[in-house]
Amino acid sequence: MFRHYKICSHRVRIEAPMFLSDSPDWKKFETAECEPDISVDCRLCSELPPCGEQARGRAGEISVSSGSGRVYRTFQLGGSSGAMTCYNPEDTSKSITWFTEDCYRVLTDERYFWHSVSLAQLMLAQNTLFLHSSFIEYNGKAILFTGHCGVGKSTQAELWSRFANALTVNGDKAGVSVKNGSVYAHGLPFCGTSGICLNKSLPLGAVVVLGQASNNRVERLVGVEALREFMKNIYLDLLAPGENGSCVDLTAQILASVPVYRLECVPDETAVIALKEELERGGVV
């Protein structure tokens, strides 16, 4: 069985023996059958096949290895290895993901599927990154609030919705891509626990790194500091060969035309006013 999706303006075809849960969020991104940019072949097995001989490291539930010109990414669910994705790092347009039969239904629901098939890694070659952020639309542009868990990304999105008539596109994640020299933010079919997930693509106006404080303070980040703060919140572990260089290069392209701000703030309307004034001064919105 095949299903076709358009994610971050890229055509993604997924083949699976028993299909994914009919998530209403994924349905928003379904499209007609077309020639894909990325093909994901999902297969069932009683136990995962051998991974690569050279261990590359571990990040959370994912362990990475390589061998024979392939990268192997194993997703561990609890105490068992639930899925393994294999792809050629020189051509990430095709991949195979094996799922153990007892983990298949869990790992193909909207919470885990993008992670289990290593979609963030496959998208990197398409000049696209996934950023941990709350994504709002304001005056026809995207503003992404990013930072560590619990810092107040959803709170700022809600405040902008309430006091600036902004629209929240995704409460937890955004795709960021470069096409023909322009940078866009994209809604994604997964949104953490926020429950807010729209299929929209907009020019990216600004990225805002959040911090908590007793007073509002906004500053423009530049150079290495902007690069470092942006890369902290990308959904890539950079363990596979070539990933780090590709990620740095793509981030540099993004930040060449998109400003990054640090907003240390209190969680009320005054934070919206302070940031909006700074974005207007900078010609962002």
Image (tube, rainbow, N blue to C red):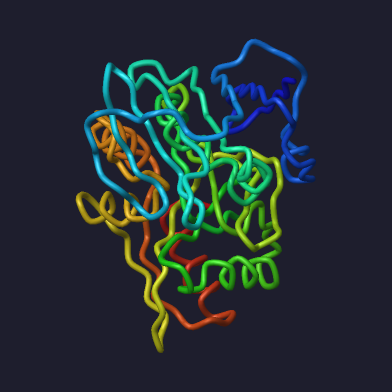
Q: Residue at x 53, y 81 (%)?
A: 267
Residue 104 position (above or below residue 136): above
Q: Residue 163 at what x, y percent from top left?
A: 67, 72
Locate residue 126 relative to residue 229 in the image: left or right. right
The quadrant of the picture occupied by the N terminus is: top right
Task: Answer with the quarter of the image where residue 21 lies.
Answer: top right
Q: Foreground: 275 or 114?
A: 114
Locate residue 175 relative to residue 57 in the image: left or right. right
Residue 115 position (above or below residue 273): above
Locate residue 155 relative to residue 281 in the image: left or right. right
Q: Residue furthest bottom?
A: 214
Residue 64 position (above or below residue 94): below
Residue 188 in view in this figure: no
Q: Residue at x 66, y 52 (%)?
A: 169
Task: Answer with the quarter of the image where residue 50 lies.
Answer: top left
Residue 146 in view in this figure: yes
Q: Residue 16 at what x, y percent from top left?
A: 67, 26
Residue 150 position (above or below residue 146): below
Q: Residue furthest front?
A: 46
Task: Answer with the quarter of the image where residue 215 lies.
Answer: bottom left
Q: Residue at x 57, y 38 (%)?
A: 100
Q: Foreground: 12 or 240?
A: 240
Q: Foreground: 171 or 12?
A: 12
